[in-house]
Image (cartoon, rainbow, N blue to C red):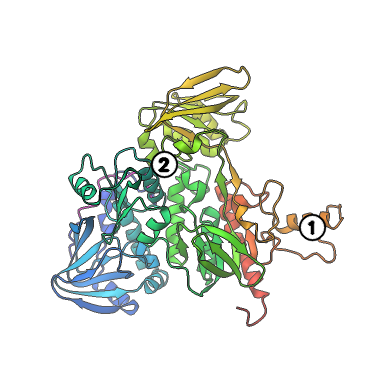
Amino acid sequence: MASTPPEFIPESTTDDAVQAPAMDLANRRHQIWPVFSAAELRRLERFGHHARHADGASMFQAGSSDFGMLVILSGKVAISRHEGLGKTSPMSELVAGQFIAEVAQLSGRPALVNGAAVGEVEVLVISPESLRALIVAEAELGERIVRALILRRVGLINVNSGGPVLVGPRGNGNLFQLQSFLASNGHPHTVLDPATDAAAAALAATYQPAPQEWPLVVCPDGKVMKNPGNAELGRCLGMLPDLSGDKIFDVLVVGAGPAGLATAVYAASEGLSVLALEQRAYGGQAGASARIENYLGFPTGISGRALAGRAYVQAQKFGVEIATPASAANLLCDSWPLRINLCDGTQVRARTVVLSCGARYRRPSLANLKTYEGRGVYYWASPIEAKLCKQEEIILVGGGNSAGQAAVFLSGHAAKVHMVIRGEGLAASMSSYLIERIAATPNITLHTHTEIIALEGDEDGLTGARWRNNRTGEECDCKVRRVFLFVGADPNTDWLRDCAVAVDEQGFIRTGFDVTRAECRAHGHTAQLPYPPPGLPERAALETSVPGVFAIGDVRAGSTKRVAAAVGEGAAVVSQIHGFLARLPVGSA
């Protein structure tokens, strides 16, 4: 049966969750909108139930309906989206044999669009749980469905369609922060400037936001908010589910970077119930990497966002519950099950906790740094930031791999990149392939023995920076509007103060024999023993000083700060979790 090609699939795409080649997406309509054969429809029957809708009936509503997948058996379905002020606009029309779903439906999140029956319509309704079961049980069909879900999300992102509408003046700092939050989470959205768009101007005239109330955000269900925080926006989009129930998870993962996502995928695929908490965006600091070229299996490289996006969809496929943004306030380990209080007052419980909370961006000691964060000072380099500095002169501070990847990426957009480091060179902290690439890039200039000592700006944002050569004492004023800071990170462990998780002198979490060695020193045993002395317990390699609490990735003392190492630890910890759960007394919670 022929399908009606939806209109929002673009002719090209930028870097995305699956890194579809630039001119390839438009040629993959057959993958984006597959048509199931009669035999395939019969195979789908056992996963759902039939429902009928009269001509013109509303089948589902953006922001409120949480179906898993709808397979059209007869009739047509018109897809539309909200634009605010009660208005909707048509997007596409699907026919019999096609299915309606998007990545959000894997985890039961609200739909991003509306659907109405065109003529008498019969559909097969498959719940989120049954959809995940279908994807696992029917390997060939499951592969086609997951590919379609991902490519649909890519299409929505690339043409700014579906999801919320952000309305605000160009250059507004609050607008940038929300746009960055959504882009980092691979969530489609539209940005409209009331100075150039009539619909946005009408919305602004209706709600009349004060300067501090920009931007206006139109949720998929049509609700309008004034300058919401990330958590409020997350709840509006279903990214932050209600966690106030009494469920006890087998595994609670704190942090959805590469390590945490690896744990979530492996644990859930082995039948454990998993909740992952992420305070800002999945992928962690790795998600900010413009291109990772030394990750096994990707000879041409892959962006951190693309790698994390694949892992994120994979986790949802196996039923992982992911809450974003969900910030942990404290870990309570004086009773069992273990408990974590979130910053919004919610408490979640689990039999085991995996700490993959990574590190916080380190901030230089500059008096007015916070004033310009998001208004000229940035801590990662995504396509959003790259557009801001097109044909401009910029400064990038840092000499690690992330800084090198960002410098190379931004050099393709900026007129000139000043790379500022305090050391005498890059060899001590950067991979050789990046050093060679930086040296071969004509618009990157490396400034050694140098640091930024002051920032300048006005009400519109950053206007300049002053740096100093620490050998010569020479200072230089540089008129730039963009400064990128990649100066390392500190362990994100302050929130563990209410639980006796042992950390080292820098605040990184000790695990396994490192814990035992520290306990030996505390008990007066100074020898470097291969086994713990009597009275001290043996621990799994990734277990902390608290039974049932594990640490992996960048937050763990002695870890290798590489994406591949983090993923390896995320996989390895699952077998240690099984070992811990197997030792629990029969009948434990």
The residue type indicated by label 2 comes to Ser
Residue 300 falls within the magenta-colored stretch: no
Please state the horizontal and vertical placement of residue 569, each as a whole percent of the image: 60, 56
Front residue of 7 and 397: 397
* Label 2–label 1 contact, CB within 8 A: no
Quarter of the image holding residue 389? top left
Residue 14 falls within the magenta-colored stretch: yes
Front residue of 455 and 127: 455
User: Quadrant where the C terminus lies?
Assistant: bottom right
Residue at 35% from the left image edge and 57% from the top image edge: 150
Tag 2's secondary structure?
loop
The residue carrying mark 1 is: 519
From this view, report whether residue 21 is shown above or below residue 1: above
The residue type indicated by label 1 comes to Glu
Residue at 61% from the left image edge and 31% from the top image edge: 427
Q: Is residue 131 left or right of residue 428?
A: left
Please state the horizontal and vertical placement of residue 193, each as a whole percent of the image: 26, 42
What segment carries the magenta color? 7-16
Q: Is residue 131 left or right of residue 264?
A: left
Front residue of 289 and 337: 337
Quarter of the image holding residue 500? bottom right
Packing grade of label 1 (10 A; few <14, some 14-19, many >=20) is some
Closer to the observer: label 2 or label 1? 1
Front residue of 490 and 297: 490
Q: Is residue 574 visible?
A: no
The residue carrying mark 2 is: 382
Please state the horizontal and vertical placement of residue 335, each as a whole percent of the image: 65, 71
